[in-house]
Amino acid sequence: MKLKIYEPSMQPDIEAFYCECYSALKWGYDPHARHADTVNIPEEYQKSGQFWCLYDEDVLVGTAAVRTIDTENKVAELKRLYVLPSRKGEGFGTLLFETALQYTKDAGFAKICADTRLDHNVSQHLMRSHGFKECARYNDNAFAELFFELDLKPQSGIPPMTEKPVSHPFDAIADKKSRILILGTMPSVKSREVNFYYSHPRNRFWQVIAECFGQPLPDSIDKKTRLLLENGIALWDVLAACRIVGSDDSSIRSPVYNDIAAFISDKPIVKILCNGTKAYQLCRGLNLPLPVLCMPSTSPANAKWSTGRLIETWKLELVE
C-alpha cells in the first residue's frame, strides 16, 4: 500500500477511479461540469493545498484532497475523500482522512471545513469522531446537505499540554528467525515508565498477539518477548526520537527515524506491519524494500475496532 502525492501521470487512474465510485453512487462521473476539478488537480488543489492517491500495487483504491477556501482567515476544505467501492471497510478512508487532517495542522490552517450528504454515514462518523461539528452552509455545492468544521486553533483560556523531546528508551526485539516486523510510532508515556512496549493496561496489543497464536496472555516482559520470538515476530518503532505531547501521536514533530533498512538487512523479514495510521504515515516515506501494511491500531483510542475484530484482522497477516 502506497500513499502518493498526485502527479499528472496518475490522471487516467484518477478518472477511471471516479467513474467507478460515482457509478456505484448512481450519480455518474461528469468531468466537464460537476467534477471538473478532478481533471485540473494541479490548479484546483496543489496551488493552495494537496491531493493524495492511495495505491495497492498498481490499483488506485482511494483519494483525498485539501484546498484553501479563505486565505485571509486560513480556512481549508476537505474534498474528494473516496474509496473504491470494493475496498471499503479496510481502513483506507481513515488513513486518507487523517493524512489530510494532519496536513492542515502542519500547514498552519486555523480551520478545516467539509460537506457531505445525509446518507453518507461513514464520512459523517469520520468527521464527528475527529471533533468536527456541524455548521452553517459555507459553500454553494447544491448536492451537499450537511456541513462540518473543525477549529484547529487552541481554545483560549485552556493551557496547551506541554510538548517534550522524547528519545526511544529501549531496544528492538528480534532474532535471526524474525520474519515479520511490527512497527509502532514512539512508546507511550506508560511504556516509557515501564521501559517496555505496549505497557498501557488498556492497549490490546499483547492480547491480540497472544490470541492470534493461540497462546495465553503473557504477564511479564520475558514472556512477552518469548511470545514474539517463538512466532517469528520482531518489534520496534519507526522513530528514535521526536517532540510529542504526552502519548498523542498526532502531535509528533521533529521526527528522527530509526534505521529500519539496516535493521531488516540481516534478518529474513518478509513484510512490515504498522500498528496504526500514524506509524504507517511515518514509515511510508522510508522507501523500504518490503511490503509495508497499515494495520488497525491496538490503542484504546481506536474504540471503533472491537478486540475480536482486531484479532481477526491481525491474524490474517501474522499467521500463515
Image: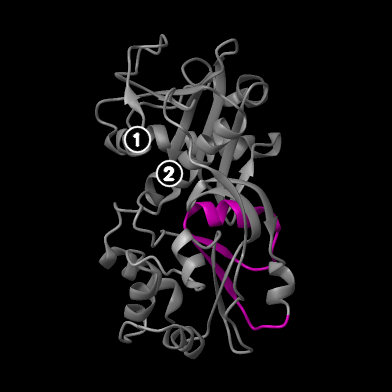
User: Where are the magenta residues, as a range?
Assistant: 266-294
Q: Which residue is mark 2?
A: 93
| Mark 2 nearby-residue class (10 Å; few <14, some 14–19, many ≥20) | many
**Dots 1, 2 in contact, CB < 8 A:** yes
Give, as a three-letter code, the residue at label 1.
Answer: Ser
The spot of residue 2 in percent (x, y) is 59, 52
The spot of residue 176 in percent (x, y) is 64, 89
Q: Quadrant of residue 170?
A: bottom right
Per the image, label 1 sits on a secondary structure element best described as: helix
| Mark 1 nearby-residue class (10 Å; few <14, some 14–19, many ≥20) | many
Q: Is residue 264 magenta?
A: no
Q: Nearer the viewer, residue 191 or 261?
A: 191
Quadrant for the N terminus, please. Answer: bottom right
Q: Residue at x 33, y 12 (%)?
A: 136
Q: Is residue 267 above or below residue 201?
A: below
Mark sitting earlier along the chain (1/2): 2
Per the image, label 2 sits on a secondary structure element best described as: helix
Horizontal placement of 121 versus 220: left or right?
A: left
Q: Which mark is residue 123?
A: 1
The spot of residue 239 in percent (x, y) is 63, 60
The spot of residue 17 in percent (x, y) is 50, 39
Q: Residue at x 49, y 25 (%)?
A: 153
Q: Residue at x 32, y 34 (%)?
A: 128
